[in-house]
Image (tube, rainbow, N blue to C red):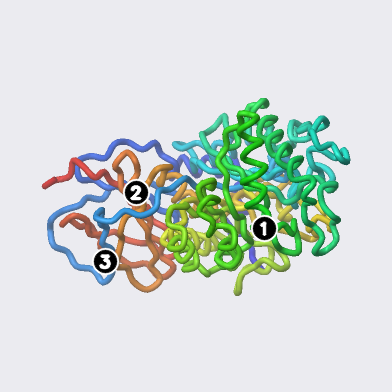
Amino acid sequence: MVKASDFYKKVGIAGLGFFFVCQGLFSQHQGNSRGSIEVYVSSEAGDRLTKKNDALFTAVTKSSPIVIQVSEENFFQEMEGFGATFNEAGMICLNALGPADRTKVFESLFDSVQGSGFTLMKSPIAACDFASAGPWYSYDESIDDTLMTRFSVKRDLGANGLITYIRKASEFGKFKIESPMDFAPDWMYYSLKKGEKHIQPRYFSALARYYSSYLQSYRKNGVRIDYLNLFNEANNEWYSNVTYKEMAVMIRDYVIPRLRSDGVSVKIQFGETANRPEALQKFPPALDDDNLRKLIHSLTIHGYDWDKFSTVTDLHNRYPRLPIWQTEVCYAMPNNVPPNGPAKLPVYEFRDGEYWGNMIINDLKNWASAWIYWNMILDEKGGPWLVSNEHGDPDNNAQHPVVIINRTTQKVYYTGLFYYLSHFSKFIRPGARRIATSGGGDQINFVSFRNVDNSIVLNILNSGVARDCLIAWKGKSVVQHLPAHSITTLKWKTSGLPGE
């Protein structure tokens, strides 16, 4: 049984905000003094993105049992961003708060100075399992309306709607959005029976219009969708049974011609597989076609295998010109919990963030160019969720979010996941390139990047007891203390250091 820590029991959002200020959380970054390193720590002992005293690189020889060597000789993937997902469930929770507290939550997630600075978000196309403001829906329920004359995003404009949610978030930061779809309108399928959830070919053209209408309607209402995925976790039993070969035909012969005809600009993605290995199994029949690959911006995978990170590198090696994004993962009861995972959701314990921090680092070290969590905000029950069994949305579907809002007490809890994810989203900005990093020790995980402003960011995750670590870079070094069960971010400029 997972219990809330005393810290989380004692503070609601107001207290948490005061704690942030006292600890220097999300302090405005000032330019590094000559040779200095900014240091930020979140730890089980109580630090929460706390800015520590600056460290200093020196040429003095030091020794340490643990050494991490940072090098800029080799560059790897370019980062698009980090974030989570907009769902109606999150906006329902936010609307349980007063205006001031609601603003603080948005600021904590999207403001790049005062908050996490999320830069890459997911927004599902119509209903998913957390479209909780009403029954399951699509944007056109009129049978055989192939010209989309009755297409409407009215629900998304409501108080709990996705457009409302996204527009509010955009007041606090800049981010891009990728959009996949669980289901097209029901009338486009052969049936919703198991194995029959294929789009009828006679509706391929109508489906292309559906996507175009979605993109245009959102744009007219102030929301730009940057990346389009045709289906979510397709070619499985629970959602659309559409195969990737069928998706290739839809993209090449219907969707792209329709978007070009309508003057709609969006980047096409391919995937949203349920787990990492599934991509290697199901992509090749479609992606081995050179002509299709030219139409695809990036590949998207989910993390529900929990630990098959090397398959991401295998996928990169097979299709090296296509960036790979991890675009969904979470705890979900009763079936989607890793071995030795939590017994109850959501999880209030700070140390749980350690699990997610390791997952993020391992995905990044295996060529992931983006990392998006599933639900950004849920309530104290891990909901509310939508129930629509014929659409693969079961009851008792408690899940774990980045932020928990108790809709009864109106208290806000920032999870361990929130802090560990923030160490990446806040400091590793879009356009950053992963750089070579080696060394380490038992229960130490790490990754480093060079941002477009020429700052280097090194994230070190310590899953064990407190210990010291020597960081070496360009003939200089510094010894950094790593608290027990913590994540430490070190950030420094690549110019202006002694001897350069």
Residue 233, disc = 1
> Measured from the top left, where is residue 312 in percent x and y?
49, 63
What is the C-alpha distance between the residues marked 1 and 3?
41 Å
Decide if residue 210 is in sight here: yes
Horizontal side of residue 188 vs 435, given as left or right: right
Which residue is tagged 2? 52
Q: Which is more N-terminal, label 2 or label 3?
A: 2
What is the C-alpha distance between the residues marked 1 and 2?
43 Å
Horizontal side of residue 465 vs 473, given as left or right: right
Label 3 crowd (10 A; few <14 / some 14-19 / many >=20): some
Against 123, residue 155 (above or below) is: above
Residue type for callout 3: Val
Residue 331 vs residue 72, the one in the foreground: 72
- Judging from the image, what secondary structure is the residue with disc 2 in? loop
Residue under the point 68% across and 51% down: 231
> Measured from the top left, where is residue 348 in percent x and y?
61, 58
Decide if residue 45 is in sight here: no
Which residue is tagged 3? 67
Which mark lies nearer to you, 1 or 3? Answer: 1
What is the C-alpha distance between the residues marked 3 and 2?
21 Å
